[in-house]
Amino acid sequence: MLNYALLKTGICYDVRMRYHAKIVTSPSDYTDPHPEDPRRIFRIYKILAENGLINDPSLCGAENIGNLMQKVPVREATDEEILEIHSKEHLDYIVSTSHMSRQDLVSATTKSDSVYFNNESYQSARLSCGGAIEICKAVVENQVKNGLAVVRPPGHHAEPDVPGGFCLFSNVAVAAKNILKNYPEKIKKILILDWDVHHGNGTQKSFWNDPNVLYISLHRYEDGKFYPATNFGGPDKVGDGAGEGFNVNIPWTKPGMGDSDYLYAFNQIVMPIGLEFNPDFVIISSGFDAAEGDMLGGCLVSPDGYSQMTYMLKSLAAGNLAVVLEGGYNLDSIAKSALAVTKILLGDAPGRISNTLPKSETIKTVRDIIKIQSRYWKSLLPGYGSINMGENTLKNYDYLHDALRGNQVRKYMSNYSLVNLPIIREKGSPSYNDQILCSADIHKKGTVVVIVHDSPEVWGSIDPVLGTLDNSQSIVVDGSPRFIEWAQKNDYGVLDINIPRSITGHNSDNYSVANGSQDTCLYVWDNYIQCFDATKIIFVGINEAYSGIVHLVGHRETREKVSACISFIGDCQLRSIVTIIDEYITDWYYHSSLVFTSRYHPCWDKSLNPKRPRRKFGRVIMADQCGSNRILEERFQEAVEFIEEALESESEESDSG
Ligand SMILES: [Zn+2]
């Protein structure tokens, strides 16, 4: 028999919550009103009415609002309820604002962390908090199937002892705590999902030690620079004591996050953890400031994106779901977003999403969080043990890039008779072993090919449970032998320079492939190459290490000898030549170079770079493939023809000269 489907969706709305407003102290308060604007809740109520979800022509909060939704009366939260989360001092302070003088209110506003007060703030805050409690209660008691609390002021920044970020009482936290207290048989575990663009520091703090409330927040973080501008929203903040593992932060590293990013995080983290936690009740801390059009939030979630997320959360806790408004400051955006969410509550299907590809930053963020949270949640695979290398207790292990170089060296020595060329360093490391190899008679060769590369690529297959590399299904891809064989066929000398990605055993915070390559290329030029007999030098750069070549030809007078600089850089950052030597160097580099990039390299993104790459980057060419080794395979012939032409034209010049 149908049960859930026959119930209505509850809604809490009360015009008295519009009385909390910023006291006007300057003309700019009219022209540029405070973003936490009393009209916010009205606009949501209005759009629901305009779309026939509620029937209330007066828009004042009628008793009977039609067949789809049911009014859940709002009341003021009691002291007892508020004190479940907040301190007595906090409550007393908010109470005191109800009879402060105008001057005191203005000064309390100025002193606070992004909160304003008038004499009605206290009542609005009590109603907002009471509305959150009542909507949850109505769902738990099966008066409605689910519910929406259109309330303000918002709550999730209000900490137990201090208001903040437009929030006076921590509405959702107070509601969750009181539901757990009053329905101990029915509701033992609550999931709070906070998709407001800001981190809900107040909610997090309220349940920091509580294993019965799982708090998951998706928010802009940017190394703690985005509001509330602390590190409490960081990925490593997982709760403490009994609550350890019951706090999940999904902190974005940049603005512009959209549907694809949120859905990716939902599919990878929120839903696996949500299903494993298996809550009895779900509350959405529903700020709409990540919505498209919200200038404060700077993100791009569409109404369809919100509908998808609501749909997924509705699948938890047998549909026991309450949505409580938090932030959201573009009046059109919050109205459209709230409408989309409410339609899902009523039983509509979610809208379709056109773009489902997450940003690469999102994939990295999600991967980092899985590393941390897989300690607590078994459903987040691959598991934790094998992928957090820094914390293991192993004694015997090698870093893969060192092992790969070792293998490469053995191969080059036996197949191509290359020998080690020593380089003096202050401090040794396995990463510096056999860093440079060369033909035994390189000093006598007329033409020398210098190959500067990163560690070979591994195309790996990861064990989906353990997170280890499946060796039998993984391959090492190395493009250098194509050039070594070509050089040896032509009786050219070969110099092979390996640039490690990090230096094993060194505390190498300041090390990067780019500066490692610069230093090594300069050293090899100064100490070896310029002393050789060679009159023609060919540089081949593979991946990020190529930047050492560009640096070298910009900082040493190499033009006499260098015939061509060929690079296969995939998606690595373009490196420009500097005009330290003279102004003609840019022209020379442009004519002597080929820089093959992936077709997805940002330099081809017309929205970022309307013009093609400048000449100072060399002759930049778009390959069909991605990844430097695939590109090398694709463009090898073209590169060789370019080099041969350069060598020939130089021979002609010297013949005629
Ligand atoms: Zn917010």
Image (spheres, grey):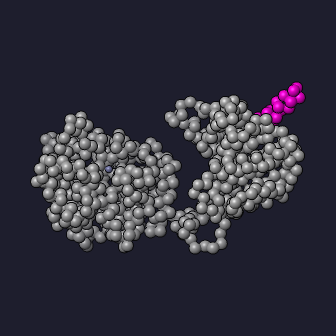
Residue 596's image quarter? Answer: top right
Describe residue 303's horizontal placement relative to residue 132 as left or right. Answer: right
Residue 582's image quarter? Answer: top right
Q: Is residue 148 magenta?
A: no
Between 512 and 645, which is closer to the camera in this rendering?
512
Residue lying at the far top in this picture: please name it. Answer: 656
Residue at the location (50% across, 50% down)? Answer: 361
Residue at the location (21% across, 62% down)? Answer: 90
Q: Is residue 644 magenta?
A: yes
**Percent x, y for residue 214?**
35, 65
Considering the whole magenta stretch, tell me its main secondary structure.
helix
* Chain part drawn in magenta: 642-657
Residue at the location (65% across, 72% down)? Answer: 396
Residue at the location (42% across, 56% down)? Answer: 250
Residue 67 at least partly seen: no
Between 499 and 578, which is closer to the camera in this rendering?
578
Describe residue 155's horizontal placement relative to residue 237 as left or right. Answer: left
In the displayed structure, 113 sits above or below 598; it is below
Residue 608 at least partly seen: yes
Q: Quadrant of the C terminus?
A: top right
